Image: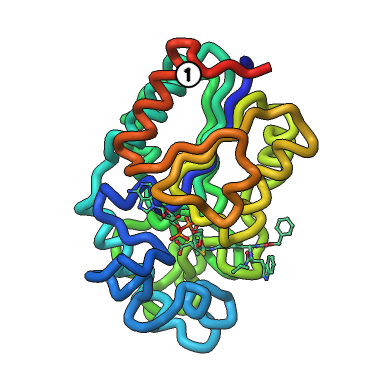
Amino acid sequence: MQTIVILTGAGISAESGLATFRDPKNNNKGGGLWCNHRVEDVATPEAFERDPILVHEFYNQRRRELRDAHPNAAHLALTELAKNFEGRTFLITQNVDDLHLRAEAGKKLPRYKLLPMHGELRKARCEVTEEIFQWEDDMTTATPCPCCNKPGRLRPHIVWFGEMPLYMDLIERMLAECDLFISIGTSGNVYPAAGFVQMARMHGKAHTVELNMEPSGGSSMFHEKVYGPATQIVPAYVQRILTGDVIVD
Ligand code: BJW
């Protein structure tokens, strides 16, 4: 086995205390809603144009919550995989939190690449110049842009509905080349990520595995499925890979 592609979603960060998007049992976070708004209503360029104060507040709140969150055993297990697997590991995350990055803790992992395809909460982007900045604090319509020094030009560096996800060329290449595709903690509702399992099977030779709390929308597409909390099933599956217990043709 030479190449592993992993796709993660909100479920991998749930046990770090970060809310998922669509879990009806997400009771203290309003059933997967944010202040009665569906993510589809706040995460669009049209919503940002219509009500930038509301959209900034959505991301400011999540950026604040991220300060108290820490990588959990599932994030750490994937870093161990990247460190010890002798082939290449591509970790595509739909999450905009930085918990995979923090799990790496500055380690040098030469055959590994992290691809945050829906952007990064701790980054801001100038709508005029497209320049990207590290961003830790709240952002408002009055915040001056660091490159043009004008207010109203900064937006969260997030891929909203209707926008093209990042790294798609590399992702499509890797899906066609990979031997093992693992999907972790995602409901399979949002494209193109929801279609990666089909791409890995149709264009490539991958063995496909779903690790999730419950069957996702696309669960029938996977060769192998394990259900349970990510902090338990991900370290166990990584152990299986590293001990040669996952056989791929
Ligand atoms: C646990 C757990 C535990 C819980 N352990 N597991 C009609 C048909 C097809 C497509 C479209 C369509 N109409 C529009 C589209 C396209 C659209 C889309 O998919 N819409 C759908 C709503 C239908 N997609 C787009 O617009 C994308 N761009 C695009 O398509 O560009 C064109 C293109 C063409 C060709 C090639 C490529 C591109 C952009 C999508 C942007 C998504 N953005 C968001 C918000 C921004 C980021 C942010 O604010 O955080 O990204 S939406 C939101 O959903 C977020 C997430 O990354 C994404 C996925 O959610 P995820 O991670 O799956 O979370 P949940 O909550 O849904 O699921 C959690 C799972 O974890 C559950 O299964 C739980 O069981 C599990 N779980 N606890 C293990 N402890």
Q: Considering only vertical position in the picture, is 215 above or below 63?
A: above
Q: On the picture, is 198 further left or further right than 49? A: right
Q: Considering only vertical position in the picture, is 168 above or below 23?
A: above
Q: Considering only vertical position in the picture, is 131 above or below 151?
A: above
Rendering coords of residue 130 (x, y %): 59, 61
Q: On the picture, is 30 further left or further right than 125? A: left
Q: Residue furthest bottom?
A: 50
What residue is rendered at 43% in x and 77% in y?
55
Quarter of the picture holding the N terminus: top right
- Is the CB atom of the residue marked by disc 1 within 8 angstroms of ligand 1's nearest atom? no
Q: On the picture, is 94 further left or further right than 208? A: left
Rendering coords of residue 196 (x, y %): 66, 45
Rendering coords of residue 122 (x, y %): 38, 55
Q: On the picture, is 244 further left or further right than 136? A: right
What residue is rendered at 58% in x and 76% in y?
45
What residue is rendered at 61% in x and 40% in y?
222
Residue type, mark 1 in image: Ile
Please tell me in which quarter of the rendered image ligand 1 is found: bottom right
Res 201 quadrant in image = top right
Residue 150 visible in this rendered orientation of the protein: no
Quarter of the picture holding the C terminus: top right
Q: Residue furthest right?
A: 203
Residue 220 visible in this rendered orientation of the protein: yes
What residue is rendered at 54% in x and 31% in y?
113
Res 176 quadrant in image = top right
How many tags in the picture? 1
Q: Considering only vertical position in the picture, is 179 above or below 181?
A: above
Res 174 quadrant in image = top right
Q: Secondary structure at mark 1?
A: helix
Crowding near the residue tagged with mark 1, few <14, some 14–19, many ≥20 C-alpha atoms within 10 Å:
some
Rendering coords of residue 173 (x, y %): 73, 35
Residue at the spot of label 1: 241
